Image (cartoon, rainbow, N blue to C red):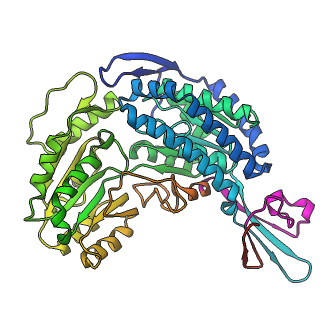
Amino acid sequence: MTLTATAEDASFDPHTGERTGAVPHSTADDVSRILRRANGAAPVLATLSPAIREGWLAAAAAAVLAASAELVDLARSETGLGLARLEGELARMAASARFYGAVAREGSYLAVSRDDLDGESSIVRGNFPVGVVGVFGASNFPFGFGIFGHDVASALAAGCPVVVKAHPAHPRLSVRLAQVVRDALAAAGAPEGTFDVVVGFDSGLQLVDSPLIRAVAFTGSQQAGMALVERGTRRGIPVFAEMGTVNPVFVTPAAATDRDVIARGFVDSFTLGAGQFCTKPGLILVPAGHGFVDSIAASVARVASAPLLTAGIAAAYRSGLAELDPHTAPEPQPAGYEVAPRVISASLDELAPGSRMLDECFGPVAVVAEYGTVANALAALDRLQPSLAGSVFSGAEGDEDAVAAIAQLAQRVGRVAVNAWPTGVATTWSQQHGGPWPATSRPDATSVGAAGLARFVRPVSLQNATSIQLPLMLQPQNPWNLPRRLNGRLVPCE
């Protein structure tokens, strides 16, 4: 990562490429003041019950919904994403914030336990908030993984102040959404410093380098994610980077009878949002001799061109296509960042370590490879980089090839979708949105779902402390009504 002299993040319309405004960068003094306020809020948040924080998140969610028309309009002008997509994403963002508040109130994430030792001795253990969290949002989900997305809401629910770095792909939306959330939290009683935003590349570096930041969450490219991981490692802080790779799909021979349905579903999935999903299925392995390649190509031909998020993403997509298929002449470049979807055929032999076929190309492109035997296809799956998700399409319930593929993918991805596409990620207790490196920097973490709060707490034990010396969550009277483990026995809350 190199420093930039740019003093503002400019805003562009992806449909035309025209500049529509700009947001000035935060100064170093601005960032320092924001960090000091956040650090001052940290001990206050840590002592308040999860039920109070649930109320804050509910208030912020309501404020975002009340401002939805303005926020969606801003998002459309800066991202080129459609109205229905953005309205749905904003509604899901609000619902996710309420979900994380409910997870906090339920309390099992605190993992409270107590053991009575020999004599008068005792030891108690629980998860404490880590402190101020820095969040780097994503370009492709301005609401779901942006200023008030999963990382932010789960960190606030866990009792951590949050400082978000605005994404340069949608700077005007970022600062306006931050204002809505900050004002709502303050009106609900959250202390000053609970939430804020900074703008600019250098501001982001200042966040990671600050001793007041105790953890970082990131969603984006592998290059930027690993740069942040390396920078955070210098200070020994965790950086939870969700980066994504090529998410594979395996179609068993028994599923070939559903060829056209699978082909249409595959195209719909990898072109969803102009192919700008981290869960986009980038590769499909299909049995040879069943016409899958032609059926997929016919479905792609019916999908219209769409703008990508930024000029840089559009340029990278076009260069990626040239690397994936160097024999195809480049298409004329329309106005703005519009690109056409593509499907590229490959042999199993081309799916080898070092092949461009195994690297993500961000945008509406995917690779289809036919296989002769299931054994060869499973061997090809084993050569892929680990991913966030994978899909297996099977025939009847007794399809043994599907069983083998599911077992193999479970070793290499965070989520296996059976007879379903990986692009939908539900915010639930059982969700896992992560995976082995290089899909993420921490394979034990998830950025979606109830377990996401675990990223922002750390375990602490207190031995021989009296009741009055214990924090509220660990006191024997259990004033927060938490589920606990007492002398090894799980005791649910009342």
Question: Horizontally, is 39 left or right of 316 in the view?
Answer: right
Identify the image quadrant of the N terminus.
top left
Front residue (pair 309, 252): 252
Residue 165, percent from left and from top:
55, 34
Relative to 433, residue 254 above or below: below
Identify the image quadrant of the C terminus.
bottom right
Residue 457 in magenta stretch:
yes
Across the whole image, how many numbered discs are drawn on residues?
0
State the image quarter where residue 467 is shown.
Answer: bottom right
Q: Which residue is drawn at the image coordinates 19% and 72% (left, top)? A: 254
Span shown in magenta: 455-484
Residue 399, percent from left and from top:
25, 77
Residue 492, percent from left and from top:
72, 70
Question: Horizontally, is 206 left or right of 465 in the view?
Answer: left
Question: Horizontally, is 417 left or right of 206 in the view?
Answer: left
State the image quarter where residue 487 is shown.
Answer: bottom right
Q: Visible in this render: residue 145?
A: no
Relative to 340, residue 343 above or below: below
Residue 80, percent from left and from top:
35, 29
Front residue (pair 35, 152): 152
Question: Horizontally, is 242 left or right of 458 in the view?
Answer: left
Q: Which residue is drawn at the image coordinates 26% and 47% (left, top)? A: 268
Relative to 8, residue 287 above or below: below
Q: Which residue is drawn at the image coordinates 70% and 48% (left, top)? A: 159
Q: Which residue is drawn at the image coordinates 69% and 35% (left, top)? A: 185
